Amino acid sequence: MEFLTIDDLVSRWRDSVSRRTLGNWRAQGKGPPYRKIGQSVLYRLSDVIAFENGENGTTNDQRN
């Protein structure tokens, strides 16, 4: 299982989405599902790909 950090995700999306936008999405329950491990926010690559393909709309799923 591969995870992306916030910076990895910003790079993957070629800076079209900022760190701030990702933070806002998390607060609003939007964007790809994420996990918070300690202080780190991580996105599972398979969840990111599904989000990119429109397979899982907005979510407020914060899995620990």
Image: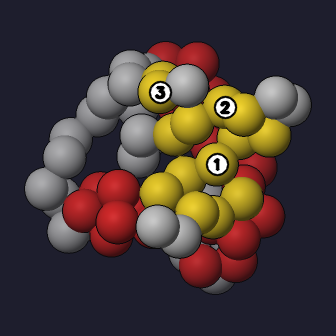
- Tell me the residue that label 1 is attached to: 42
Q: Position of residue 51 (x, y in %)?
A: 29, 57
Q: Earlier in the sequence, mark 3 or mark 1?
A: 1
The residue sitting at the right extreme is 39
Q: Earlier in the sequence, mark 3 or mark 2?
A: 2
Q: Is residue 32 above or below residue 13?
A: above
Q: Earlier in the sequence, mark 1 or mark 2?
A: 2
Q: Position of residue 35 (x, y in %)?
A: 57, 36
Q: Nearer the viewer, residue 14 or 36?
A: 36
Q: Position of residue 47 (x, y in %)?
A: 35, 56
Residue at horizontal 72 percent and vertical 55 percent from the top: 6
The residue sitting at the front extreme is 1
Q: Residues within 10 Å of mark 1 (few under 14, many from 20)?
A: some
Q: Is residue 56 above or below residue 59?
A: below
- Tell me the residue that label 2 is attached to: 36
Q: Amino acid at mark 1?
A: Leu
Q: Is residue 58 above or below residue 27?
A: below
- Tell me the residue that label 3 is attached to: 63
Asked which quadrant contains residue 4, the reply is bottom right
Q: CA distance from mark 3 to mark 1?
A: 10 Å
Q: CA distance from mark 3 to mark 2?
A: 7 Å
Q: Amino acid at mark 3?
A: Arg
Residue at horizontal 78 percent and vertical 64 percent from the top: 7
In the image, taking residue 13 as reference, residue 44 lies left or right, namely: left
Residue at horizontal 19 percent and vertical 46 percent from the top: 56
Q: Are marks 3 and 2 in contact (CB under 8 Å)?
A: no
Q: CA distance from mark 1 to mark 2?
A: 6 Å
The mark tally for this picture is: 3
Q: Is residue 41 visible?
A: yes
